[in-house]
Amino acid sequence: MKKRYFIYLTLFAIIGIIVYAFFIEPKRIVVHNYTIGNNDGKKPVKVVQLSDIHIQEKYPVTQLEKIVTKVNNENPDIIVFTGDLFDNYAKYGPAEEVIAALSRLKAPLGKYAVWGNHDYGGGAARVYPDILAAADFQLLENTGINVSLPNEKSVYIGGLDDSILGNSSIDDTLVDRQSEYTILLSHEPDKADDVLDHNVQLILSGHSHGGQIKLPFITIKNTLAEKYFTGFYDLANNTTLYVNTGLGTTKIPARFRVPPEIAVFDLYI
């Protein structure tokens, strides 16, 4: 009797985990708030990072609307997107609906994005720049922009091209830099090792999904997201890397113990 009870309990637990991983956690959105720099009594610059939305039939535009609402509730100064808007644009790509949703994101100091590997694949490369432009995002492709801040300082936001399917160049990305503080957007986090001698203070990445499914003794890692996987890393030359675990899913429409994330940074510059 005890053995049968244990078997039933185990089966119910497995079914519960599967239901949670496929139907509940992927639709959760967790907002993580962080402080970077020393609070000197002045107002910080609020930067919101989105990454790896992977819009698909299992993660439609209705979910994107929820993301937009949560981001706007944070009242960001700057919004950055570190790549992978659609999972496979050729299979599911409601461009007009996505433009309408992304257009509702509000950030007075600008919205900036870079290429991810999925933005090149599935036919997305021919529409990704136009979708972002229509939604008032500036696509940074080995380029950057000096953003003036209310405190009379400025921050340089540089964006690397995708390092898997694109042609990333850190030298080209920083050529127009005139600010003392630099935020570098790089879809793949392991690219960070190549920029540590370029006086970059903060690198924001995605791509890893944090493994997407977190099981004991099992870690699922992506190309160029093997060394740096999730969260903060203090690197050489006072460089900080943050790896966002993303919002959507790929390959398997499930998440377990890695909920979709919006990262909010209060930067004291």
Image: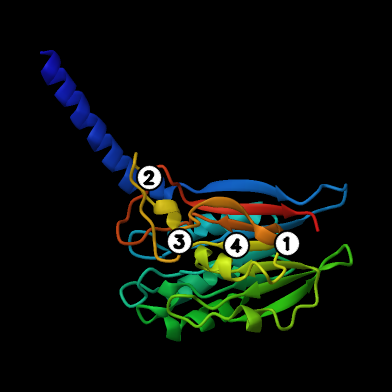
Q: Say which of marks 1 and 4 sits in front.
A: 4
Residue 170 seen from this side: yes
Q: Label 1's element?
A: loop
Percent of width and height locating residue 83:
50, 69
Q: Amino acid at mark 4?
A: Leu
Residue at (68% x, 66% y) in the render: 183
Crowd rating for badge 2 (residues with CA inside 10 Å; few <14, some 14–19, many 20+): some
Task: Tell me, for residue 3, which label it has, or none.
Answer: none
- Quarter of the C terminus within the rendering: bottom right
Neighbourhood count class around disc 1 (C-alpha, 10 Å): few under 14, some 14–19, many 20 upward = some
Marks 1 and 4, the one that precedes in the sequence: 1
Residue 151 in the image: state x and y as whole percent: 88, 62
Location of mark 4 (residue)? 204
| Kind of residue sitting beneath label 2 | Lys
Q: To which residue does mark 1 refer?
A: 77
Foreground: 174 or 146? Answer: 174
> Circle 2 is placed at which residue position?
214
